[in-house]
Amino acid sequence: MSTDKPRILMFAPFCYPPASAESIVTAKLLLAFLDAGWEIDVIAQADSGQFYPYDIKGIWEPIAEITKNIDVSKGFRIFDKLPNSKLKRTLSRTQSLIWVAKAVYAARCLSAKKKYDFMLSRVAPQYGHLPALIISKEFNIPWIANWSDPMPPQKAPQPYGRGPTAQIPYLLNKYYMEISRKASWHTFPSERLRRYFCYYMPNITNNSSVIPHVALDGVERKNPSNTESFILCHIGGLGLRNPKTFLEGVKLFLQQTKVNSYFYVKFVGLESDAIREIAINLGIGKLISIEGAKSYEDSLTIAETSTVMVIIEAPCEEGIFFPSKFVDFVQSGKPILAVSPKVGMLSDILSSNGGGIAVDCKSPGKIAEAINILYLKWQRGTLNENFGSNRLFNLFNEQKVLEEYKKLFGILGS
């Protein structure tokens, strides 16, 4: 067994084409594995959730060669327009189980031809770990289960879920307990998320660790350019992350600061109507630029031409999440304004290492203060020097992430 060039089998329903946050995180990790010369086969779901446009001829092209995409949509597309009913949920579960069955069959065929050193599985979606649970018993392959968000969703912190003590159905609870017991190791993108899981899955405490999202070496911008206009840019969907408090902070900044340069806020994503309505009601509609969802590579170009990259998080009691966009923004080298919980992952990183400012997502006043600091540094021409996020790149680069996996392989392969 080689830990330098291991053979890996991965189950990742949301993988290819990369058109959602989870699939992009997985695809970036696969590119890092391929850059290192590792041998990997991926079993994915061809019809998995797609939220952004994608271009399979760009940086993601090498992933097509290692991915077996299982399409289970045949016969189900006619139900896409059904309202969110019990019938539609049942059909969705059936579709997921069909994928699991086909993924297990594909894994058996691959394992009959090739001896894998390690097996990885990723979640979301919830059923991403199920094929690995089955195959690990049959082939006795060391199995690493990755958790990028609280699972099941009911146990996510408010406002996303009902917290770690939330009651879940018996069979669902049994499924998660089996994963927690049978997986050889569990990885998380942040220590706060790992601790959160350990609260309701205490048996993973001693066989779990943190491996952050990866920043790709090939797209790093070491010397980000200055911009003629001051552009605050948010890229990606918002979901339950309401931008109202952030926009209130923008309005307060404009009331308190004499802005004699071209200033605007750009949103690139899906929830345009709600953003526009909030901005108009606050009287700053003319300063808001809204664009539809962009492909990953297009979003990198947008980041390069922006002044400050904005991340908006929901007002959780503790910021346990590690948004994948944060690492994408680090690749651009631009300063990051994290509008996030006062206590949390992004505050930990930025307060300890620089690269931007983390500010309480409940306080328009604090948001206005942070924008003012960044704006004044931009006016003086020292913004990237003082707050550039390129200083964070070594925390997440390919070498750092691959070394963490090598350490883990050494533990599991001994």
Image (spheres, grey):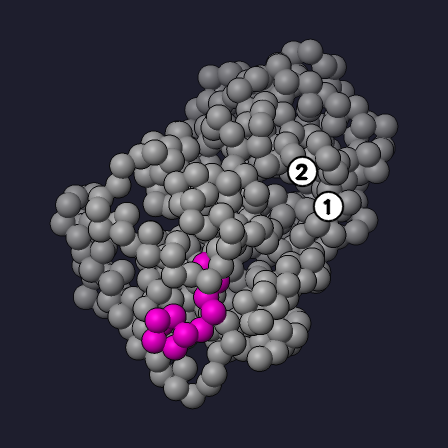
Give the number of callouts.
Answer: 2
In depth, the one of 272 and 17 nearer the eye is 17
Residue at 65%, 11% in the rendered image:
255
Q: Quadrant of residue 36?
A: bottom right
Q: Is residue 355 visible?
A: yes
Residue at 43%, 39% in the rendered image:
199
Screen quadrant of the C terminus: bottom right
Query: What percent of the width, then of the height, locates residue 88?
Result: 18, 50
The three-letter amino acid code for the residue at tag 1 is Leu
Please give the range of residues in magenta: 135-145
In depth, the one of 228 and 134 nearer the eye is 134
Tell which residue pokes out farthest to the bottom in this image: 113
The three-letter amino acid code for the residue at tag 2 is Ile
Query: What percent of the width, then of the height, locates residue 102?
Result: 29, 73
In depth, the one of 327 and 265 nearer the eye is 327
Task: Read off the residue under disc 2.
Answer: 349
Tell which residue pokes out farthest to the left in this image: 87
Looking at the image, residue 247 lies above or below residue 131? above
Query: What percent of the width, then of the height, locates residue 99?
Result: 29, 66
Marks 1/2 in contact by CB < 8 Å: the verdict is: yes
Task: Read off the residue under disc 1.
Answer: 392
